[in-house]
Amino acid sequence: MRIKLLDHLRDGEATVGQLQSALGASQQNVSKHLGILHGAGMVTRSKRGTSVVYAISDPDVFALCDQVCGGVRRQVAELETILQPISDV
């Protein structure tokens, strides 16, 4: 969920409601993960009227996201290679 939030914020700042709608998650879940990302210094938040707007605090965070996602993609590809012969039987 946190990687999805960061990836969505790649396109620009967003409110909890916008992120909730885009990701199909509950408000509570989105808020919890944004709080953790904020505590880690990965996102900033600012109050605009009655809304809180979140944004990426440092664009270098995307290098981390790309590295994590690349690692996951490699693991999935390896699992598919291992499981392919089994499904051919």
Image (tube, rainbow, N blue to C red):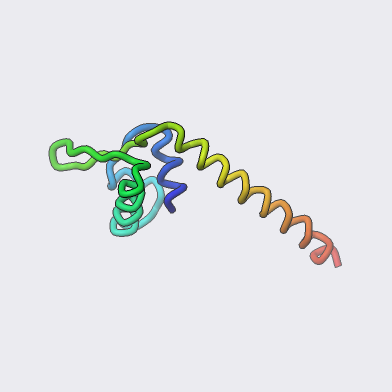
Picture residue at 32% right of the left edge, 35% below the top: 13
Image coordinates for residue 89, horizontal then vertical, percent: 86, 68
Image coordinates for residue 41, horizontal then vertical, percent: 34, 43
Picture residue at 84% right of the left edge, 62% below the top: 85
Residue with the most extreme left position: 49
Residue with the most extreme right position: 89
Question: Where 75 falls versus 56 (above or below)?
Answer: below
Q: Quadrant of residue 25?
A: bottom left
Picture residue at 42% right of the left edge, 50% below the top: 2
Question: Where 49 falls versus 75 (above or below)?
Answer: above
Compare residues 50 and 42 and report the one nearer the observer: 42
Residue with the most extreme front position: 40
Compare residues 8 and 3 and report the one nearer the observer: 3
Picture residue at 21% right of the left edge, 37% below the top: 46
Compare residues 38 and 26 and report the one nearer the observer: 38
Is residue 77 found left or right of 58 in the rendered image? right
Is residue 67 found left or right of 30 in the rendered image? right
Question: Where 13 falls versus 35 (above or below)?
Answer: above
Question: Where 10 falls versus 86 (above or below)?
Answer: above
Image coordinates for residue 42, horizontal then vertical, percent: 37, 42
